[in-house]
Every structure is written in C-alpha cells, then in structure tokens.
Image (tube, rainbow, N blue to C red):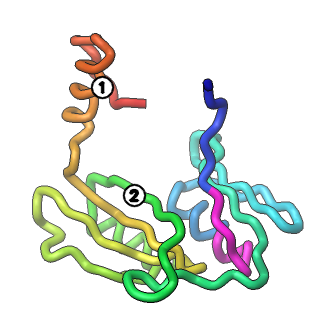
Amino acid sequence: MKLVRNVIVFDAADLTAESSFWAGIFGGYVFEDEAWHSVVDADGEWRIGVQLAPNHVPPEWPHGVPQQVHLDLHVDDPRAAHEEAISLGARLLRPAPDLDSDEGHQVYADPAGHPFCIGWGHPSQETLAAFVADRLGRRNHAGPAR
C-alpha cells in the first residue's frame, strides 16, 4: 500500500481552540468546515485533522482516562519550543529533569487534553539519516529521513 497522505485526527469539543493550537505549533493554517478542521503546516502539508466531538472526554494522563493518541515533536531548542507551546495553550504535564541535557523530552497536553511530547537529541537527524541510508543501501544519503 502506498500512502498519499498521513493525517493524525483528534476529537475535540472546541474545534477552533484545538485546530488553532496545532496550526500554531506547525506554523501553519486552518481550513474550517462545520464539524471538521484541517491543519496545514507552513509548507502546505496537511498534518492534523480535528473532528467535532461534543461529548469528548479529555485524557487524564498518566492516571485516569487513557491518552488515546499522542504525538512526538522533535526540536533543536527545547526552551523555545516550550515557550511557544505554552503561549499557544499547552499545559505542561511532566517536565524534563534538565532542559540543557543532550537529550530528553517533556510531556504536554493540548487544549483538548491530548498528550504530546516535545523531545530533543534522540535520535539526531544525522543518526536517523544514517540508519535509513544503511537500511535502504544508500551509503551517501545525507538528508533527513522521510
């Protein structure tokens, strides 16, 4: 099977809050419909779908209602990513022991309560590119894996 698009879909009672949050994280835009919003990133790729779920029960991670789904977002600057996520409406659920460490992650919740992680340093783009190149037999592959 060849996928044309891969979109993560979140349920939310407040479509605008949820889609605006993710558009801010991806530096993109929201295309709105009555019961569905599509979040497109700055490069024009459709990344997140948000469907209206008036009776949505937010996860209570790590105890309570299971997390249902989560995203791992990898960044170069965890402090800047933290500030941006918080300014867009995220709640910090589990802080990292040290934002200055070579690798780590923090766990957040988006406005609808869906957990997501902001991580750094594991694995690096170079390490991942080398892994993919090795597996695909492309020894001189220099770009990030796609």
Q: Is residue 15 left or right of residue 127?
A: right
Q: Which residue is mark 2?
A: 72
Q: Confirm whether the magenta stretch covers residue 11.
A: yes
Above or below, 84 against 5 in this view is: below
Numbered tag placed on residue 132 in the rendering = 1
- Amino acid at pointer 1: Val
Q: Residue at x 76, y 75 (%)?
A: 53
Above or below, 125 against 140 in this view is: below
Q: Position of residue 67 (x, y in %)?
A: 48, 74
User: Which span is picked out in magenta?
Assistant: 9-18
Q: Nearer the viewer, residue 52 or 31?
A: 52
Q: Is residue 36 left or right of residue 102?
A: right
Q: Is residue 87 visible?
A: no
Rate crowding at label 1 as few (under 14), some (14 to 19) or many (20 or more) other CA atoms within 10 Å.
some
Q: Quadrant of residue 79?
A: bottom left
Q: CA distance from mark 1 to mark 2?
A: 19 Å
